[in-house]
Amino acid sequence: MKKKYLYVLSTALALFIAQDAFTSSGGSPSGNSGSPASNGNTCARSGCHSTGTAAGQTISITTDIPAGGFMEDSIYSITVTANNGGASSDRMGFMASVESPSGHTGNLQITDAARTKKAGSYVTHTFSGIAGSNGENIWNFDWDAQQSPDQSTVYVAVNFSNNNGTTSGDVILTESLVLSKGSGIGLQELKRESMSAYPNPAIDQLVVAGEEFKAPYVVLNAAGMRVKELKLVNREGQHWYFNVSDLKTGVYLIQDSEGRGIRFTKN
């Protein structure tokens, strides 16, 4: 009876460990981006992962925010790239947040549901998102700046797994990127004061009228996800002409490289 009891206990423990490992590979629990709102926490702590020594692993954070800074109520793409520094395993996971001194700021939006997902106010990997290629893993998501202040910061923690089937020996690093705010007015104010779009609703053609509208031009849907990049068909003075005939019926935002934009409806 004692041997049978020990066998059952061992089997149950193995199942528990396997389930815990699977859950972690499917995304980090919220509050582990190494940020102030995370209290500096990452998964490199007791009960989660025991981290090894870094050996050339790196993290980079890039955005499409223009040199002039981000604008209020505008949506930007954030890309996190992890390089394993020549290690044998391409399995890597991450967690990211955008914060100001008062806490989480803006709104993070998923653009690649196969590889990323929300975890509260954070973004993390999915089970499919841990697989890198040629030593790199890349995750993309959007950030709606809303009314975020200057010096908002992207915080990222990456777990470089050694793929040994346990939580020991992995390397966990953190990185951050400070975002400067543009001195111009925000999208909502810009829309109200100096931009318009017609016909609205649009059927085949959309005309954006304003003082300035710089390529490239990106169309976002009502959920804030990028739909496509629009090519300029024609320009007459301060009027920019676009073909929107292939868009489905719905509400969209067309935005230029400087964060200027206007919402429109497609019929």
Image (cartoon, rainbow, N blue to C red):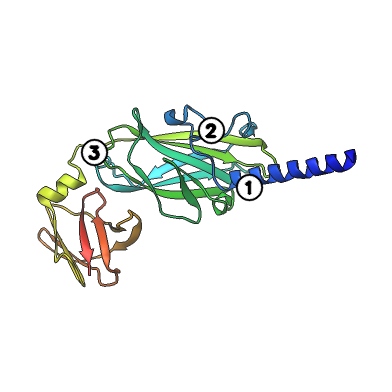
Disc 1 to disc 2: CB gap under 8 Å: no
Q: CA distance from mark 3 to mark 1?
A: 42 Å
Instruction: Mark 1: give few (<14), some (14-19) or many (20+) Cα within 10 Å.
Output: few
Residue 159 in picture, x, y percent from top left: 57, 39
205 sits left or right of 57 in the view: left
Quadrant of res 176: top left
Residue 188 higher or lower than 169, as above or below: below
Q: Which label's residue is closer to the chain start, 3 or 2?
A: 2
Provide the residue designation for mark 2: 42
Q: How many marks?
A: 3
Quarter that holds the C terminus: bottom left
Dot 1 amino acid type: Phe
Residue 146 higher or lower than 198, as above or below: above
Dot 3 amino acid type: Gly
Whether residue 87 can be seen here: no
Of helix, strand and loop, which one carries label 2?
Answer: loop
Which mark is drawn over residue 22? Answer: 1
